[in-house]
Amino acid sequence: MTLGIKIAIDGPAAAGKSTIAKITAEILGYTYIDTGAMYRALTHKALVRNINTNDGKELEALLEDTKIVLKPSASGQAVIVDGEDVTEDIRSQLVTANVSSVATHMGVRQLMVDKQRHLAEGAGVVMDGRDIGTAVLPDAELKIFMTASVEERAMRRHIEDEKRGFTTSLERLKTEIAERDRADSEREVSPLRQAEDAVLIDTTAMTIADVAEKISALAEKRMKL
Ligand code: DC
């Protein structure tokens, strides 16, 4: 029996990575791992404890003392930190505004990468984030770099927020997304960039079903190689 391949999906904020990764994992019967949720989980815990998100050493110590569990759930993936369900809390505006800063620290990233590699061991996985194809799983059999225009990404996030009962201004979302793109691409450690062997998919004019189908077809091909 084959254990399955590793699929890395990277790209800028709100490009639809999580939605697509979840669906692809379901189609293939693979484990889905949302690495952004792990950085968000640490950011949330740091904010609750009043820890400065610019202090890498403090954050590293905090992460060493934190248990993050990603559990499949009806709505996709539940995030449990030290036994507490923080799935909703980690999507707050405050966490979103601070997570890029937490993700810049080398020590934090090293610990996260260790945890992520461990989670990916021994089974078929679809992992999404910013540095999966370049740093976490450089040997992934399939790498996707997913992008979409800032306008389209802001609109998708706006609709998603409305469904969850939040009203967010489209202009503000555009500014926030562009700022997060900048911070994630310009940081020194593992910046967001397309791996040389990644397949670029611009989802601006594609439906979710089209993208999931395209990735599943690419995965089927890689499995046969
Ligand atoms: O995908 P997301 O919006 O939930 O990610 C939140 C932040 O975490 C993102 O702005 C950058 C950071 N991140 C990262 O640096 N590396 C990853 N593999 C995943 C996320």
Image (spheres, helix red, strand yellow):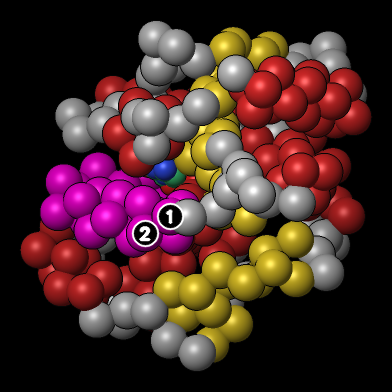
Judge the density around disc 2: few (<14), some (14-19), many (≥20) Cα neighbours within 10 Å: few
How many angstroms separate mark 1 from mark 2 (CA)?
A: 5 Å
Q: From what the image shows, is residue 153 above or below residue 221?
A: below
Residue 87 horizontal/vertical position (percent): 63, 71
Left or right of 10 on screen, residue 63: left
Q: Which disc is residue 118 wearing?
A: 2
64 or 72, which lies in front? 72
Residue 47 horizontal/vertical position (percent): 36, 72
Q: Amino acid at mark 1?
A: Glu
Residue 109 counted in the magenta span: yes
SS label for mark 1 = loop
Residue 109 horizontal/vertical position (percent): 25, 49
Residue named by callout 1: 121
Q: Residue at x 14, y 54 (%)?
A: 107
Q: From what the image shows, is residue 185 above or below residue 93?
A: above
Q: Residue at x 70, y 34 (%)?
A: 16
Q: Are marks 1 and 2 in contact (CB under 8 Å)?
A: yes
Quadrant assignment, res 196: top left
Kindly give the residue lying farthest to the left in the view shown: 57
Q: Which disc is residue 149 wearing?
A: none
SS label for mark 2 = helix
Q: Amino acid at mark 2?
A: His
Quadrant assignment, res 45: bottom left
The range drawn in magenta is 98-121
Kindly give the residue lying farthest to the front in the view shown: 1
Quadrant where ligand 1 appears:
top left
- Is residue 91 among the parts visible in the rendering? yes
Q: From the image, which quarter does the C terminus lie in?
A: top right
Q: Residue at x 15, y 73 (%)?
A: 61
Left or right of 16 on screen, residue 45: left
